[in-house]
Image: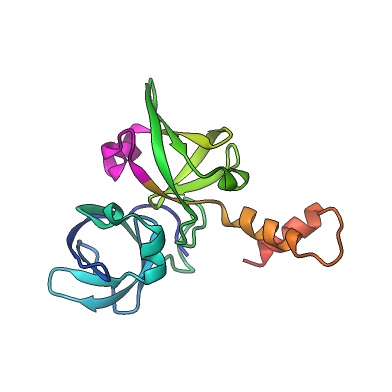
Amino acid sequence: MFTGLIREIAKVKKFDGSTLELKANYKPKIGDSIAINGVCLTATEIKKDSFVVEVAKETKSIIPKEKFEKEVHIEPAMRLSDRIEGHILQGHIDTIGEVVDIKKQKDGVDFYIKVDPYFIKYIVPKGSIAIDGVSLTINEVFDSSFRVTIIPHTIQNTLIKNYKIGTKVNIETDFFARYIEHILKHQHIKKPISWRDIDLINMSY
């Protein structure tokens, strides 16, 4: 599990299609889970000034190659003792979004992200979403896109400062919404969901 709070920006030393070598101040141990631009990967080798994570075939079929180039967000897996200051993430990317508009505001920057309309049902106004592993609040939702407002601190300390129209981004939607939909879809007894049902679902994770 992760929280969507980026620990640092790591430099990509090499990506050969199967393994990704990163240079960072953070030093994991072999077997540790690390979110790379929001993708949960496992450390398989530790070198003097870098570490290596393995990129599975399934991951490569979803994630654009450019998300493993130049620089990447990294976040180690959370510990049970950690505070949850962002929101709970699994590191499983649901879909790839695209920046379609950028508008500067007085107190930040609005980014409009287009996604496959299928995933809009998991994107809730004032709910949470992860973009390239960064925990953000959704301000507005449309038929096939949504708007987030990024404050200056987040822009300055993440790769969001490099986004432009056409930039592809990794999207992880709220996993509670996905679990609830799955449970409702596979109920043998069709009945309206109650708040007690929702509380039980939340307490299960």
Q: How is the image coloured?
A: rainbow
Q: Residue at x 83, y 67 (%)?
A: 188
Residue 37 or residue 136, whichever sits in front = 37
Residue 88 visible at all: yes
Q: Residue at x 37, y 57 (%)?
A: 63
User: Residue 173 placed where, x, y %?
Assistant: 53, 51
The quarter of the picture where residue 64 lies is bottom left
Q: Is residue 38 above or below residue 140?
A: below
Q: Residue at x 27, y 52 (%)?
A: 66
Residue 76 visible at all: no
Q: Residue at x 52, y 38 (%)?
A: 138
Question: Residue 108 magenta-drawn?
Answer: no
User: Residue 36 placed where, x, y %?
Assistant: 33, 60
2 with respect to 44 (left or right)? right
The quarter of the picture where residue 27 lies is bottom left
Question: Residue 167 magenta-drawn?
Answer: yes
**Residue positioned most to the front:** 61
User: Residue 141 placed where, x, y %?
Assistant: 57, 34
The quarter of the picture where residue 51 lies is bottom left
**Residue positioned most to the left:** 48
Q: Which residues are magenta?
A: 151-168
Q: Is residue 42 above or below residue 15?
A: below
